[in-house]
Image (spheres, coloured by chain):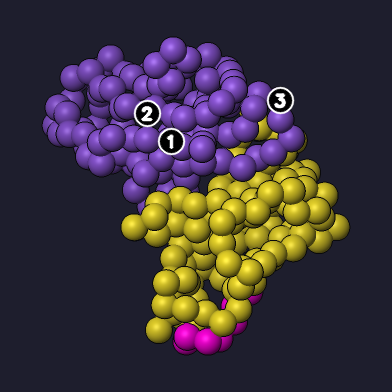
Amino acid sequence: KAGVTQTPRYLIKTRGQQVTLSCSPISGHRSVSWYQQTPGQGLQFLFEYFSETQRNKGNFPGRFSGRQFSNSRSEMNVSTLELGDSALYLCASSLYGTANSPLHFGNGTRLTVT
Amino acid sequence: AQRVTQPEKLLSVFKGAPVELKCNYSYSGSPELFWYVQYSRQRLQLLLRHISRESIKGFTADLNKGETSFHLKKPFAQEEDSAMYYCALSGQYGGATNKLIFGTGTLLAVQP
């Protein structure tokens, strides 16, 4: 099976702009979650979707949003970009979406805000 | 509050030496615990989970509820073990959530 695919791999945006990141989970996986990885804060949970419903949301401002489509593909959007939003954004999918289900990660989208 | 602590940012050992990567957690209940690994230029991937009680690539991890620890061990390190290791905590066993709380990671460097 193909792994988790994230597009684009790299993005450069300017402060104040908005950005949309895309994630295609492993076929058959219904749970998709997003993480932000930075050198200072490490890996931080953004949100989790299961069958098009947001089940959990991390401690991020409302500028960060996401959605999941009926084919389980997911997008996350960041509006009014700030310099501090520069990070690697990781998407992960799991088959059952339960606490003991391992996550399968994509390679990430590296966002640079100038 | 749920928290995962990995006290060492860097652990450097020689090939053939034993390895222990420390992980302590804070959680009220019976959590699911995982070790994820990221090799150079590769994606983050699952190494092992406590529920499976398995040994992967010679690594084992035992959940100690009394000490709230989930240390990762390997008796003889190999150079190919060099990577970033993350301890992670999920919700209550059997819970309907995939949210992971990660530790800050430990970089393991195995010297020849």
- Marks 2 and 1 in Cβ contact (< 8 Å): yes
Q: Is residue A68 left or right of residue A70?
A: left
Indicate whether B34 appears above or below B63. Answer: below
Give the crowd class for mark 3: few <14, some 14-19, many >=20 residues within 10 Å: few
Residue A78 can be seen, yes or no: yes
Magenta run includes residue A19 = yes
* Three-letter code for the amino acid on which mark 1 is drawn: Val
Question: What residue would you read off at disc 1?
Answer: B4
Residue A45 screen position, x and y as percent: 55, 51
Q: Amino acid at mark 2?
A: Cys
Marks 2/3: CA–CA distance: 22 Å
- Residue at x-position 39% and y-position 16%: B67
Which residue is identified by label 2? B23
Q: Does A46 appear above or below A82?
A: above
Look at chain A in the picture and name its colour.
yellow
Question: Tag 3, which secondary structure?
Answer: loop
Judging depth in this view, the residue of B7 and B83 nearest the camera is B7
Which three-letter amino acid code belongs to the residue tagged 3? Gly
Q: CA distance from mark 3 to mark 1?
A: 20 Å
Distance between mark 2 and mark 1 Cα atoms:
7 Å
